Amino acid sequence: MKKILSLLALSIVLFSCKETKTEETLVVDSDLITVTPTQFKSAGMLIASPKQQTFDVTVKVTGKVDVPPQNRAQITSFVGGYVKSTQLLVGDKVVKGQPLLTLENTEFLDVQKEYLEVAEQINYLKSEYLRQKTLFDEKITSQKNYLKAESDYRRAKGMHQSLKEKLKLLNINPTNVEKGKLSSVVTIYAPISGDIVVMNAHLGMHINPSDVILEIIQTDHLHLELAVFEKDILKIKKEQDVLFTVPEASKEVFNAKVHLVGKSIEGNDRTINVHAHLDDKIKQRLLTGMFVEANIIVDAKKALAIPKDALLNEENKNFVLLLSNNKDGNYIFKKVAVAIGAVSEDYIELIPNSQINGNSKILTKGAYDLAN
């Protein structure tokens, strides 16, 4: 019985060893990797030579999303006051001429009273001036009296016009003031249509004449303001394509086009301002002030390239798997360090060296699985 059990145990061990030997294993020897035909096929691996591809030649720049000066409005009041009413928040859209808020101040009444007094005096001073002119022409009165009447009238007329313009700046109708309709409250209106991006007012708050109450931006006119270094500026031309990202918000690549190239060097960095227009579809997704990283496409070139999947990166060094031999149907690959250049959506420029050229056979699909 013991002899039978021993034979059975030995059979199980031999069978297990046989099963183990039939399993295919990946052979890795230093920089050489051996792949069997079965592994090659099951993993869907591909071997190909580097091919000529077209790459964009770009100038790397940074900048921000902005709007032209005429499409940005900071709202102030040249006479201070207390905020009496407002219902707007940051992000609200407004249209040109829309009431934004009201301010209250007794100084508004003082301006109106002064205007009313001058308006009432001006008719008398005008008639006195005309009377003195007639008397002077008839040599009945002295030149002194005539000149004084003329001076008083012209001074009052100038004051009247000045106060009238001041009332208009306060959005107070001079005609209503002349009718005796005075108010200590003024309304501030939107000078442009757009989105509110700054709101510094709340009920009861005192606003000084120099304070920015709120800011409006016309987002329809968003554009890129890019800083190009002096050494690159001669490469930049109008209508060149721009690819940019907003690194703090997304990895998505957006499109723009060079519209204006500055004519002067600015700042210690010696950069030139380049203005780029955005596609209308993306304007509503961006905000003014966003930092951007951009590539301005200035030319194109042909170069040897491999698919991105063929490149391996280890410890900040780049490698490819070069077919070294095809022995007994097995594929033997050698890990070869390479230098790369331009990058497109699907390909990477491969700089030829002593081991890599246009005739080299490289594992273009499945390299990542072998290396890990």
Image (spheres, rainbow, N blue to C red):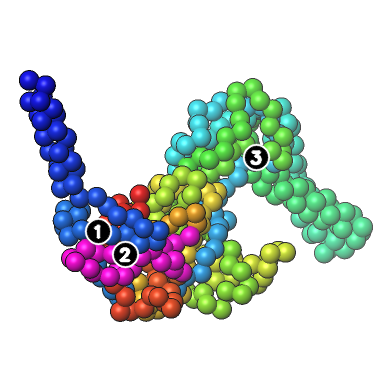
Q: Earlier in the sequence, mark 3 or mark 2?
A: 3
Q: Secondary structure at mark 2?
A: strand
95 left or right of 25?
right
Marks 2,1: beta carbons within 8 A: yes
Q: Earlier in the sequence, mark 3 or mark 1?
A: 1
Q: Is residue 326 magenta?
A: yes
**Marks 3, 2: nearer the viewer:** 2
The foreground one among 313 and 59 is 313
Kind of residue at disc 3: Val
Marks 3,1: beta carbons within 8 A: no
Q: Which residue is mark 1?
A: 35
Q: Which residue is mark 2?
A: 333
Q: From which residue to which does the magenta span run? A: 317-339
Q: From the image, which quarter does the N terminus lie in?
A: top left
User: Residue 146 — which label?
Assistant: none
Residue visible at 68% across and 68% down in the picture:
270
